[in-house]
Image (cartoon, coloured by chain):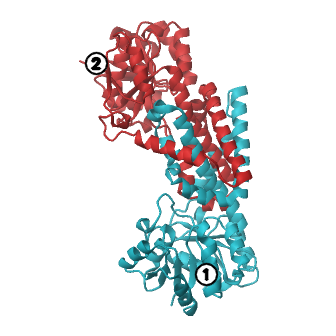
Chain colours: A cyan, B red
Amino acid sequence: MTADVCVLGVGLIGGSLLRVLGPTRAFGWNRSAPTASAASEAGFDVSTDLADTLRRAARRDALVVVGVPLPALGAVLDAVAEHAPGVALTDVVSVKGPVLDAVRARGLGARFVGGHPMAGTAHSGWGATDPELFRGATWLVAADDDADPDTWSRVARMALDSGARVVASTSADHDAAVARISHLGHVLAEALALAGGRGGDLALALAAGSFRDGTRVAGTAPALVRAICEPNRDALVAALDDCLADLGAARDSLASTGTLGPLVDEGHRARLAYEAARPAGGGDAPGGRAAVTVTPGAPGWLEALREAGSAGREVRPAG
Amino acid sequence: MTADVCVLGVGLIGGSLLRVLGPTRAFGWNRSAPTASAASEAGFDVSTDLADTLRRAARRDALVVVGVPLPALGAVLDAVAEHAPGVALTDVVSVKGPVLDAVRARGLGARFVGGHPMAGTAHSGWGATDPELFRGATWLVAADDDADPDTWSRVARMALDSGARVVASTSADHDAAVARISHLGHVLAEALALAGGRGGDLALALAAGSFRDGTRVAGTAPALVRAICEPNRDALVAALDDCLADLGAARDSLASTGTLGPLVDEGHRARLAYEAARPAGGGDAPGGRAAVTVTPGAPGWLEALREAGSAGREVRPAG
């Protein structure tokens, strides 16, 4: 029998999770009444009473998934600490260090394991939810010091049940990685769009596929881009510094010698490595290698999770 | 009756042009014999004898389209100057200023009008040719001082016959625009790919749609990226300087205040402007406005072409 899941906030990620797990296993809460009504009309059990929902989660020992944006996190965690301080807890917020800090500050760390499904962000809200959103996506399940093995297993099983592949790392390593492959990409897309805009109508008329693809995520609502990127300040500043150094070197090389220098070859090699790391089938880990099975709670299990993650390999809980 | 076209170099662009115009109207030359054979077997008239092909073009008053990469341009133009100095001449190279200089240096400027179809570059060679390559694409036809009206009309008609929309500007304005919407995008894609690669296997495993799209053109062969970007040195350095200033300001704002500053809103606005400038249908100009009809050779025709281009509007030759 699979355990209950309580989803707090049924926007794109939380709502899609509710849909894929189904109403017999998952229930939830949403602050906005119209969204809760829409979810209820679709056959899901979504309340607007946070205290009541949390007490119910505690009674049923449900895994509580915090699916609200980072600015709303503190108030929701305050309610968890008040009404369900002992529940197993995870989240789906795009940055992990600040969530971990907020959870620990409220004494909720003992049964908390952070998570982050790497799924789309261009649209938001219940109307954009999709039970297939996580199919084939990577779901980061954190392997921080003192993680509770039982909660880790429950979060990983929920991710697998949603169709995702599980990859593990510390929260800090996650934040450094997504600064490079997600947040930096948002910033560069905005900069490329702005450069095109500065070229005026002629430039926009000449823009073709490379501009369309390179600026796609600049179509995301600015408030959402900020909410995703800005909480990861330190890691994003470091990624931007590296990137500015690479771009500055290419610029200086082009100006002085007429060639872009090593950037083109290095970037091409990295893109080929990324393509090679894509899984060929749903059941295999990135790179086509089998998933690493880890027994949560066994000696060295966190180190085994982190080692697999640093090699880009999928993990699965034993049993 | 439509005029003959002689295509020099039947790679992706030249070969696709040969295919869409068809063997009764177009013939060509290619330096490599296997490619010429493959084109001949497909029913096209493609020789490996450049002098003979050019003499034939001169006899038939064909429009000669130079479709070789920039490094091979000089030798081909030398042959044009020797064997067919009076032909109507255009090109499909991705940068216009250096081509114009090379043409004028050989005394071939009187009947030369540069061109640039904004069509895909990820694959190359005869094997990648496609008669539909130009369908809905923008084809820049240069409106430089002293352009020959008859040649301009022939180049524009050829582009329209290929399914493209025609936009006009000076060669210098074209080069400044494509530095922003094409060449800068290549450089940023390489930098993003490299940033991801520096994050190691964990980062590549977590990479999702924004990284895939943002690095797509980094999959292009490095030699081709260099051949496209590096000849546009001055304009690309200027675009990089603007972009580095924007990125540096966002980096400093993030580090000091925790927000990315105006970049996110400005980039989003530019992306929306780009989306709004996409044509709704094949027959309409960018932005849904009707094409501007211009009579080549009429008083002020070059200014009319440039004015339409700077507004991002499609143009058509009268008659």
Screen quadrant of the N terminus of chain B: top left
Instruction: Name the amino acid, label 1.
Output: Ala
Q: Is residue B43 visible?
A: no
Question: What chain is tagged by disc 2?
Answer: B
Q: Quadrant of residue B246?
A: top right
Residue nearest the observer in this picture, B221 or B211: B211
Question: Relative to B82, is B28 on the left or the right?
Answer: left
Question: Relative to B46, is B260 on the left or the right?
Answer: right
B27 is higher (above) or lower (below) than A69: above
Instruction: Name the amino acid, label 2.
Output: Ala
Residue B198 placement (x, y as % from top left):
70, 53
The residue positioned farthest toward the bottom in the image shown = A59
B99 is higher (above) or lower (below) than A259: above
Residue nearest the observer in this picture, A93 or A116: A93
Q: Quadrant of residue B20?
A: top left
A26 is higher (above) or lower (below) than B25: below
Q: Secondary structure at mark 1?
A: helix
Which residue has dot 2 on it?
Answer: B318
Residue A89 placement (x, y as % from top left):
62, 81
Task: Give the Cα separation between the discs numbered 1 and 2.
Answer: 71 Å
Q: Is residue B178 visible?
A: yes
Question: Relative to B114, is A67 on the left or the right?
Answer: right
Which residue has dot 1 on it?
Answer: A79
Q: Quadrant of residue A179?
A: bottom right
Residue nearest the observer in this picture, A281 or B114: B114
The residue positioned farthest toward the left in the image shown = B1
Q: Secondary structure at mark 2?
A: loop
> Which residue is found at the position 55% from the left and 19% from the top?
B97
**Crowding at label 1, few (<14), some or many (≥20) Cα neighbours within 10 Å?**
some
Q: Nearer the viewer, mark 1 or mark 2?
A: 1
Task: Report whether mark 1 lies on the same chain as mark 2.
Answer: no
